[in-house]
Image (tube, rainbow, N blue to C red):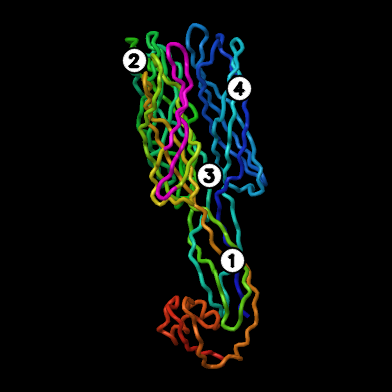
Amino acid sequence: MANLKFQNATYFCRKQVGKIQTAENVRISAKTDIAEVLSVGVDNVVNSYEAAEGEVTFYGKTFIRLLYGDGTARIGSNYNADFTAAVQSEEINSSTACCFDVVTVDVKADTNANTATLSILLEITVYAYVQQNTACLTDGEEVFMRKQNVQLLSQAGVSYLPVTVDRQLCATRTISSVLLAESGMCLRDYSLSDGALRISGDAVVRLTYLSEGALVCDALPFRFDAELDGASLPQDSSLRVTVRVKNTKVRLDIADDSVNTEFTAEIAAVVCVENFVRQDFAFVTDAYGGNCDFALQRQTCVCTLPSAQGTERKRLEFDFKTTSPQAAVNVGAVVTKCTAAENYAVAEGIISATVLTQEGATVTELPFSEKVQCNGLTPHCKVFAEASVCDFVVEENKISAELSITVDSFCDKSFSVVTSAEELPFDKLSQSAIEVCLAHKGETVWGLAKSLHMSEKDLLSANPELSDPLREDARIVVFNKIG
């Protein structure tokens, strides 16, 4: 008897388990009449989720920046609203780790006196690390096995960590009153050690304010560093870290001489951390016995592995005709499509902004298609890209924007394992003690040894001139152990 042994292998696949659209209706009341909605900016973040058997429920917040006119002046206000939704999938259970991509598809505003009703349409894509369990052949008595080393994702998790970045900044002119404050963040580096997740990157605060009756918009960039609690993250794990801005608050530093240019910006964000642990496994792909054959059942398995990453900054210019541009508010960027190629990805999307002039406001959408270098990327990888606007300048004949694009990728790896084996008897006593066999060009040493029910070592010991695979037909000598 071969006494075959099997062991359960656990690994993970990163899958899209759902995509839904959900509508929010947000009612906003102001102190004065809302005669005209000039611009609406929307940021969405998922703060937490609960996974159960067959379903994941997630909870988030929508942060709204509203700029409107009351007939005499422009007024800016910030609001927020909660949203919750659920996605059903038979691949989800209570231990499934999930992450979410939330995109604002459309925003419509209706006004009535001092009330604005916003209809916000969100598209939410849900990704899950789905655990797979497969029983695999591992060992046996007097059994010859061929094994393949495969690197698998043996552990995967998702954490949502809050972070706040404070920075004292200086406006270019005296601040009479703040209309809107918005910000963007992009990561340059991150590391995990001693239970702390350290992140660093670039941030920009766009402050729209009135200065002695004039409308001014300042873009104020700076570098940031932050340390987060990473005690729950496996210390030997690889990470994929993304940051989502929630909202931006401004505190004016009032000076005694009334020249108020300094202020403190407080950026609240959520850092999504996907963590992975890789492990090498040796899977049996074929087997035979010295005294028996096997009827083998095989299964093709798929595991997801993190792949190439890349970040690039692009300075883009667009033709834009307007007169007397004053400011650009609610500036943002979204990637609508990302395509993988050999060592690079192409990210396509839209930069959006509301351009304010003396006459009113114009919502502007600027398409982009940019190449991002990602060494090691292949066309078979699944790629994801994010974009943030680092700078945005409006002139009468053009718009200049600096765009930061980050690309992450995952590759699905297929491999075959032996999941069951039925032992078939083989009468070795019927063989001659010495045989001379004809082997054909292209045959492998493993295949010959398997057909002869002997080890590769014994076959090569008797026929040291054999190549693997055979370069030409050959006569081989076989010494059978029949005693």
Which one is in front in this view, the residue at disc 2 or the one at disc 3?
A: 2
- First in sequence: mark 2 or mark 1? 1
Q: CA distance from mark 1 to mark 3?
A: 28 Å
Decide whether the magenta segment is chiefly helix, strand or loop: strand
Q: Gap in Å between the C-alphas at discs 4 and 2? A: 34 Å
Earlier-in-chain disc, 4 versus 3: 4
- Image quadrant of residue 287? bottom right
Q: Which quarter of the figure is the C terminus placed in?
A: bottom right
Are the two marked residues, 1 and 4, in contact with CB atoms closer than 8 angstroms?
Answer: no
CA distance for labels 2 and 3: 43 Å
Q: Position of residue 296 (x, y in %)?
A: 62, 71
Q: Work out whether residue 192 or residue 133 is closer to the camera in this orientation and state it.
A: 133
Q: Is residue 353 magenta?
A: yes
Residue 50 in picture, x, y percent from top left: 62, 41
Judged from the image, the secondary structure of the residue bearing numbered disc 4 is strand
CA separation, marks 1 and 4?
54 Å
Which is in the foreground here, disc 1 or disc 3? 1
Q: Residue at 37% of width from left, 31% of height from top? A: 316
Q: Are marks 1 and 3 in contact (CB under 8 Å)?
A: no
Q: Which residue carries the number 1 mark?
A: 136
For mark 3, does the 10 Å Cα neighbourhood hold few (<14), some (14 to 19), or many (20 or more) residues?
many
Badge 2: few (under 14), some or many (20 or more) residues near its Cα, within 10 Å?
some
Select label 4 or label 3 by which is in front: 4
The residue pinned by badge 2 equals 173
Residue labelled with disc 4: 26
Q: Earlier in the sequence, mark 4 or mark 2?
A: 4
Amino acid type, callout 2: Arg
